[in-house]
Image (cartoon, rainbow, N blue to C red):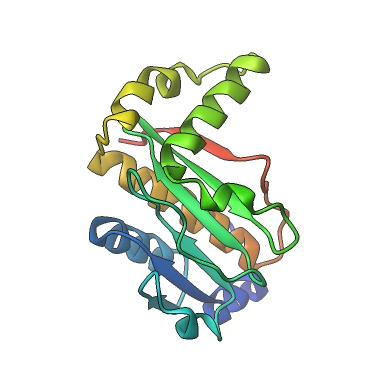
Amino acid sequence: MNMTSEEERRIADCRIAVVGADEFIDSIKTELQLLGFKSIQIISPFDEEATINIDVIAEIVNEGGSCMSKVTDIPLILPFDFVNGAGAIVVMPDDERNMLGKPDLRLWAATYMAGYCAFWNVDGCEWLRDSLSDIKNGVTNDVALKTAAHICARIAANIAVGREVKHFPRFYLCKNLE
């Protein structure tokens, strides 16, 4: 990712909060630091006060869980471990947020993305359709978590420097990088 010195400064000044499982937190911190983020705060899903001075929130949603971040005035990045790959949904302040309350947001997102890909005949998404039963059964994958962290960090960098990002109902999808 080639950046100007101004973009590097904006990334260094961006305050990001990370919510999620320990494995994801370790991976995302590494990815964010590689891109130049300096202010990375790890917060509890239930600590609304911790989000006061934050520019972006990244929250991994594990199997059977729903989104815990209730903050509505900053971008929210939701990366997902889809076993054989990863996906991410960006929710901007003005976007529809009904899906955040889904009881199994990971399964909902995987089903939504697989259905979208099938409807629009998007090539290269077969791996997601093939992963749906594993996702339904709560299977996770360390490589998929790292892929999700990689996608998430790049989205956060693009938000920090003011670049256009795909946001809900659009999404990001990537087969495992390793």
Residue 145 visible in this rendered orientation of the protein: yes
- Where is residue 136 drawn, in percent x and y? 33, 30
Q: Position of residue 77 (x, y in %)?
A: 54, 57
**Residue in the foreground of this view, choosing between 25 and 20:** 20
| Residue at image coords 68%, 41% | 169
Residue 1 visible? The answer is no
Which one is nearer the viewer's eye here, 112 or 104?
Answer: 104
| Horizontal side of residue 65 vs 172, given as left or right | left
Residue 111: image location, x then y, percent? 50, 28
Residue 151 place in picture, x, y as percent: 47, 48
Q: In this view, does 117 lie to the left or right of 50?
A: right
Q: Residue sitting at 28 percent across and 59 percent down?
A: 21
Judge whether 132 appears above or below 56 on screen: above
Q: Which of 150 and 138 is in front in this view?
A: 138
- In the image, what residue occupies the spot 42% across and 42% down? 104
Is 147 or 110 nearer to us in this picture? Answer: 110
Quarter-of-image position of residue 93: bottom right
Image: 64 above or below 175: below
Residue at image x 31%, y 56%?
A: 24
Residue 7, placed above or below residue 140 = below
Q: Quadrant of the N terminus?
A: bottom right
